[in-house]
């Protein structure tokens, strides 16, 4: 009796983790934290131009004064050094304690943070960043280009640092003066700025880290950053408290304190919000089924967040049946996307049939699509391919392990299984906890199909990890030399438009090969109290000028 | 008595080692490559994998890893978390106050409550029937579900208690106000555990009272003309409470392991949640540390229960 309940509890925990998926891969709640972040069109915009963030002139006059903001946090951060390890629960907090050089807006564009402007050279080999001149570390030391040099050289020279591979073309950083940092690249990169603005690339104080082991430095427990809020305390399992940084270089902060309450369970979160114990949930944990309750209540704003992430069916290309393109086409034609969204995702998503995300529309090749739903043709294809229906009513049976990320993930797998049975394909569902799933699909190579989701930003360079030969997520043996060549060319193409054109060609090849079957985009709903404004969420201008999770502009209207 | 104690202690040392060996093997038998978890990659190149294995000391054969672990253990060091690099002793230590507060208070209340109910209903047929029925219902209730129901009734509807957490996030209380705030937050998770655990104590006490009342010495007392009430209070009760005392003693052994389900529902910052997080993240040193602490506390609880027993029950004292 209790066991069923236990599963429910574990789900909500697991769901809130990024779990063993690639560092670039945010699964569901991982999605929830990360998907929004990243950026895209900005890559082009900023390579060409140099946007400047404008702050209110009287910024210094308004620091703090608006009380405490209580924010949902669904798990414990690993540490408060946001750069040395993957840490999705530390990531949202780091936006308030730390700054980046550049960051990503809610529309996945590269926008200024501590670098107020930048230029890229003609050949794409140097990027010059101009820093704001009034930024200070929380201990009062000024933030200078020396910190920039140390941080980013440290990232690319540290094996295992999550930001390293993405920024590996960074050779050195020159510091002609205190507020100018020149990045020298070994080759031009159309994806560099996007990755610089994304994950595990926060600016760290050189004077506290230099000469120490950055994975065990005590500063990791009591962080000193340059963000809008200062670290006050962390009570493991309960809460993290931050207080307003009066010396913040930008506008704000307006709140006196931010308290992240660690609440791992979705049902509890719902009650805590109703009971006025939590002001804001932008974690994505809030249960979709309960949205009607808070909407009817009248005290809360709900806003849908669509992530730059696709759900997609993955084939083991190394096996006879799933290695056969006609079988993959037949499976694609057996998939009814609208039904998966409705029954599997409870409506939280939209059908998607492109190999990149429609959310980052400038990079998405909307002509390169996966097969459309056509069950009759699917059966014909399977007959032709030499897989007639056997005595047991099925043509063949596929092994289908899937990730134990909660109800939605289980429902999706069940809907896919039912749809495949309609065309005579049986499958054996096995729900596996992330590490066990990882062992089975990647290490043991013991599966026919499975499915994934994940953040496809900050730019189309994210395709390489999934479809490039030997990519960190490409455990399914997909390999096409032409795709590899185009991915490499696109990544080192200094001209942004040409780079994008090449990425669109890649998507055309993926569609031709039916490399996978994308079926849905992912979405969640944020819930927060009506009187709160300035959150970096859809529909609020703060999200256009601040990174995901940055609460500098959050205000509480006096009511 | 001393010999008895020494003998108990003597069996504990091999038991302790056995527990450590089994825990260590079990943790490493869990499917999945921990370095995938630590690096966040689904598939790693052999070189990258090897580099990470070396970094985390996982490239050595298991027995070597175990010996290395024991060596650091005997220097009084539980090691460091593979993920955060923080000392394990610190990570467990900071969770212990909340855990002990919850488990000790609920076990004690359930123990007292279960026995009181058993005694009050023992000689009243209808009350006994009613208590048994309610006991069954509570006993079979999923902790998780009961917790949410209590939140909805007492926090959302009646507004008597806070929904979850250890303290009020909007205030920074100190001193007495802080203590009262913690107690206020403790009420619902504690009540949940009491409701789930109480029927166990009740049933043991009830069965034991029933049995004791059938025993020969009670019949003898009855024949000597003592009133039923006096026999029950003075003679039957003392003997009947022994088994539930054992149960209570053993439950104290598990006090340090926390109550994961209740901790999740009430966002209570206890050891149970740390254990679960560490399992999912395959943070081996933290898990070993937790198992070590639990093993020691369970053995200590058994020893203390034996001693207390010997004090209360002369039969045991004389036998040894």
Image (tube, rainbow, N blue to C red):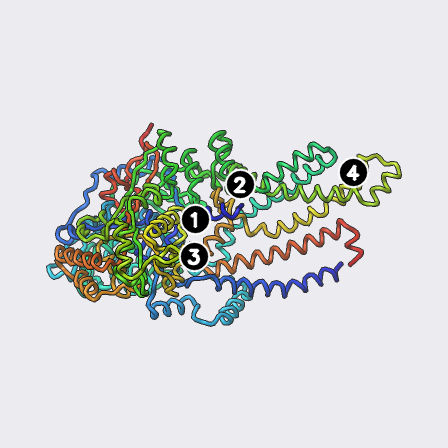
> For numbered disc 3, what is the local secondary structure?
helix
State how far apart marks 3 and 2 are (Cα): 26 Å
Say yes or no: labels 1 and 3 on the same chain. no
Residue A394 shows in this picture? yes
Q: Which residue lies furthest to the top in this view?
A: A559
The circle drawn on residue A11 is 1
Assess disc 4: are there few (<14), some (14-19) or many (≥20) residues with their C-alpha within 10 Å of its C-alpha: many
- Left or right relative to B316: residue A361: left
In the image, residue A502 sits, relative to residue B148, either above or below, namely below
Tag 2 near tag 1, CB within 8 Å? no
Mark in front: 4 vs 1: 1
Above or below residue A72? Residue A459 is below
Q: Name the residue under label 3.
A: B281
Q: Tell me, for residue B232, which label it has, or none.
A: 4
Mark 4 vs mark 3: same chain? yes
Label 2 chain ID: B
Please tell me whether residue A182 is drawn above or below residue B264 in the rendered image: below
Q: What element carries label 4?
A: helix
- Which image quarter holds the N terminus of chain A? top right
**Quick one: label 4 or label 3, which is nearer the N terminus?**
4
Q: Nearer the viewer, mark 1 or mark 3?
A: 1
Q: How far across and down, in percent of the image, does residue B50 sit? A: 37, 70
Residue that badge 2 annotates: B189
Residue A420 is left or right of residue B156, and the answer is left
| Mark 2, secondary structure of its residue | helix
At 71% from the left and 63% from the top, the residue drawn is: B7
Q: Earlier in the sequence, mark 3 or mark 2?
A: 2
Query: Which of the chains bears the disc numbered 1?
Result: A
């Amino acid at each position: 009796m209790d066991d069923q309940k236990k599963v429910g509890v574990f789900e909500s925990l697991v769901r809130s983790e990024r779990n063993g998926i690639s560092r670039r891969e945010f699964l569901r709640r991982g999605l929830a934290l990360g998907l929004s972040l990243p950026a895209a069109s900005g890559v082009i915009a900023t390579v060409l131009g140099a946007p400047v963030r404008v702050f209110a002139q009287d910024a210094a006059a308004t620091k703090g004064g608006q009380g405490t903001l209580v924010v949902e946090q669904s798990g414990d951060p690993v540490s408060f050094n946001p750069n040395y390890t993957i840490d999705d629960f530390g990531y949202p907090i780091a936006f308030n304690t730390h700054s980046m050089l550049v960051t990503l807006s809610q529309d996945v564009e590269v926008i200024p943070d501590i670098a107020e402007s930048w230029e890229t050279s003609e050949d794409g080999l140097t990027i010059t960043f101009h820093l704001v001149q009034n930024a200070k570390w929380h201990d009062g030391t000024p933030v200078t280009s020396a910190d920039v040099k140390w941080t980013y050289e440290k990232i690319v020279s540290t094996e295992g640092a999550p930001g390293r591979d993405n920024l590996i073309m960074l050779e050195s950083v020159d510091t002609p003066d205190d507020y100018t940092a020149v990045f020298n690249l070994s080759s031009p990169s159309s994806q560099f700025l996007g990755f610089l603005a994304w994950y595990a690339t926060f600016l760290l104080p050189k004077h506290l880290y230099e000469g120490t082991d950055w994975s065990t430095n005590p500063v990791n427990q009591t962080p000193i950053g340059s963000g809008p809020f200062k670290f006050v305390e962390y009570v493991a399992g309960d809460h993290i408290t931050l207080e307003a940084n009066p010396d913040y270089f930008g506008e704000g902060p307006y709140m006196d304190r931010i308290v992240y309450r660690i609440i791992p369970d979705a049902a509890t979160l719902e009650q805590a919000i109703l009971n006025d114990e939590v002001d804001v949930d932008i974690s994505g944990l809030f249960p979709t089924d309960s949205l009607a309750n808070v909407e009817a209540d009248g005290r809360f704003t709900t806003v849908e967040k669509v992530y730059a992430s696709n759900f997609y069916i993955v084939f083991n290309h190394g096996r006879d049946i799933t290695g056969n393109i006609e079988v993959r086409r037949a499976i694609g034609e057996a998939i009814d996307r609208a039904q998966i969204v409705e029954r599997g995702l409870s409506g939280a998503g939209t059908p998607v049939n492109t190999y990149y995300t429609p959310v980052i529309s400038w990079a998405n090749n909307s002509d390169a699509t996966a097969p459309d739903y056509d069950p009759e043709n699917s059966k014909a294809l399977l007959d032709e391919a030499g897989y007639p229906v056997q005595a047991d009513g099925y043509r063949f049976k596929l092994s289908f392990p899937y990730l134990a990320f909660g109800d939605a993930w289980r429902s999706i797998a069940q809907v896919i299984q039912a749809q495949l049975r309609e065309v005579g394909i049986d499958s054996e569902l096995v729900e596996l906890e992330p590490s066990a799933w990882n062992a089975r699909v990647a290490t043991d190579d013991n599966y026919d199909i499975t499915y994934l989701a994940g953040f496809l930003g900050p730019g189309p360079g994210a395709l390489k990890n999934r479809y490039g030969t030997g990519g960190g997520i490409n455990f399914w043996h997909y390999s096409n030399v032409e795709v590899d060549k185009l991915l490499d060319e696109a990544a080192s193409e200094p001209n942004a438009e040409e780079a994008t054109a090449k990425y669109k060609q890649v998507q055309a090849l993926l569609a031709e090969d039916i490399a996978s079957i994308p079926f849905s985009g992912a979405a969640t709903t944020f819930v927060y109290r009506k009187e709160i404004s300035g959150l970096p969420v859809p529909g609020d201008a703060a999200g256009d000028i601040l990174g995901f999770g940055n609460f500098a502009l959050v205000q509480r209207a006096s009511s | 008595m001393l010999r008895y104690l020494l003998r108990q202690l003597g069996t504990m040392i091999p038991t302790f080692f056995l527990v450590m060996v089994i825990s260590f093997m079990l943790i490493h038998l869990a499917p999945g490559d921990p370095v995938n978890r630590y690096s966040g990659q689904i598939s790693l190149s052999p070189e990258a994998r090897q580099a990470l294995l070396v970094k985390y000391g996982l490239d050595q054969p298991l027995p070597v890893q175990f010996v290395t672990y024991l060596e650091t253990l005997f220097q009084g060091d539980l090691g460091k978390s593979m993920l955060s690099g923080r000392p394990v002793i610190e990570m467990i230590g900071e969770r212990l106050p909340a855990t002990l507060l919850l488990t000790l208070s609920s076990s004690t209340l359930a123990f007292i409550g279960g026995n009181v109910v058993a005694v009050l209903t023992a000689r009243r047929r209808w009350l006994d029937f009613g208590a048994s029925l309610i006991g069954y219902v509570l006993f079979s209730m999923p902790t998780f579900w009961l917790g949410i129901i209590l939140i909805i009734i007492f926090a959302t509807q009646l507004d008597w208690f806070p929904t979850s957490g250890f303290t009020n996030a909007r205030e920074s209380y100190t001193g007495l106000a802080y203590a009262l705030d913690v107690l206020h937050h403790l009420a619902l998770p504690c009540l949940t555990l009491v409701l789930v655990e109480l029927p166990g104590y009740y049933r043991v006490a009830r069965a034991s009272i029933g049995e004791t009342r059938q025993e020969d010495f009670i019949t003898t007392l009855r024949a000597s003309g003592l009133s039923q009430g006096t026999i029950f209070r003075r003679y039957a009760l003392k003997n009947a409470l022994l088994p539930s005392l054992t149960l209570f003693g053993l439950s104290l052994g598990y006090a340090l392991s926390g109550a994961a389900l209740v901790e999740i529902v009430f966002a209570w910052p206890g050891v149970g949640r740390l254990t679960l997080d560490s399992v999912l993240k395959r943070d081996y040193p933290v898990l070993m540390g937790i198992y070590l602490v639990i093993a020691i506390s369970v053995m200590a609880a058994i020893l203390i229960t034996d001693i207390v027993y010997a004090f209360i029950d002369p039969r045991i004292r004389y036998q040894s």
